[in-house]
Image (spheres, rainbow, N blue to C red):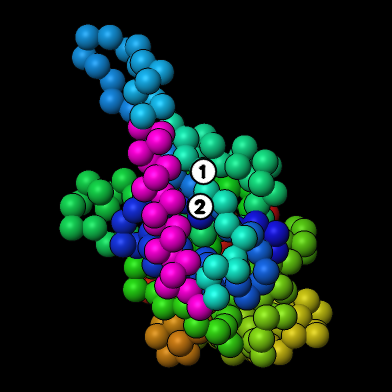
Amino acid sequence: MRTILLPVDFTFGSYIAAFYAANLAKTTYAKLLFFHSFYLPVSNQEFHISPDLIKDTEYKTKKQLAQFVEEVKHAISEGTSLEINFEVAAGPFQNMVPHLIINHQADLIVMATHIQKNEFQKILTGSQTLSTVKQSEIPVLVIPDTAIFRKIYTVGFTTSLEDIDNIDVLWPLMQISWLSDVIINYVVVVPDGQGKHSQEQLEEYILLENTFKNIPHKLIVIENQDITNGIMDYVDKNKPDILVTIPKKHTFMDSLKHKSVTENLIKKINIPILCLQE
């Protein structure tokens, strides 16, 4: 892992995500890039924004971000040894992601999911994270407000191996397995009554053995008509430290019909979720 990109909006959830990212960077020897995008007020009379206003807003925002970074470093054991950069820029964050990834060679984005009192804020901040998960070309680690960083021992991997065209997409999962004594629970959700000795289960198990042959792993079959509920049931019973999934790409018409499993999990599960990108 080279560089972790951490979008910051100065909320409590953003601090929790930053704390998690800093600990992860310390463990993996990765660089940290804190980034905040800000919006400038637009006058009702004219759309011209003076350069002085931009400069002043950028200065104040960068000062606020620098203070945020210092608070995170002080909260982390040996946090001062971390290699940290931070940037601010005016405009929508989503438009800047591709440039940030290229310019800083980022290979992981860590973002917060928020529990907001204000419903509008909840929709806004939640949509930012979900949009990043859908659009990012690199893995996105989603951190809930209640998450506490801890050593990873159990990984719940929920995506069908048969759906993966390029096995390289699993590289971040392999990296996690090298951090400590990790076991990967490969979770398959099947309709009620079809969980035993099904052809699909046997094929999945063969793929599992070939893919993770050098990593401790086991197959867990959950019987449930609803995939999201089945995965949530697995999380409740097995208490994994992190959940890994590969969001499926849906067309616009598909998105009108149903929410993705990943989106439902992000909204409902209180452990970190690593979203890999094909």
CB within 8 Å, label 1 to label 2 = yes
| SS at badge 2 | strand
Q: Camera-side residue: 114 or 216? A: 114
Residue 170: percent from the left, percent from the top? 71, 67
Indicate the amino acid at tag 2.
Phe
- At horizontal 48% and vertical 74% (from top left) the residue drawn is 76
- Per the rendered image, the range of residues in magenta is 57-77
Looking at the image, residue 265 sits to the left or right of residue 172; the answer is left
Q: Camera-side residue: 25 or 270? A: 25
Q: CA distance from mark 1 to mark 2?
A: 6 Å
Q: Is residue 8 magenta?
A: no
| SS at badge 1 | strand
Q: Is residue 71 magenta?
A: yes
Residue 231 visible? The answer is no
Is the residue 65 above or below the residue 224 in the image?
A: above
| Corner quadrant of residue 220 | bottom right
Q: Which mark is residue 34?
A: 2
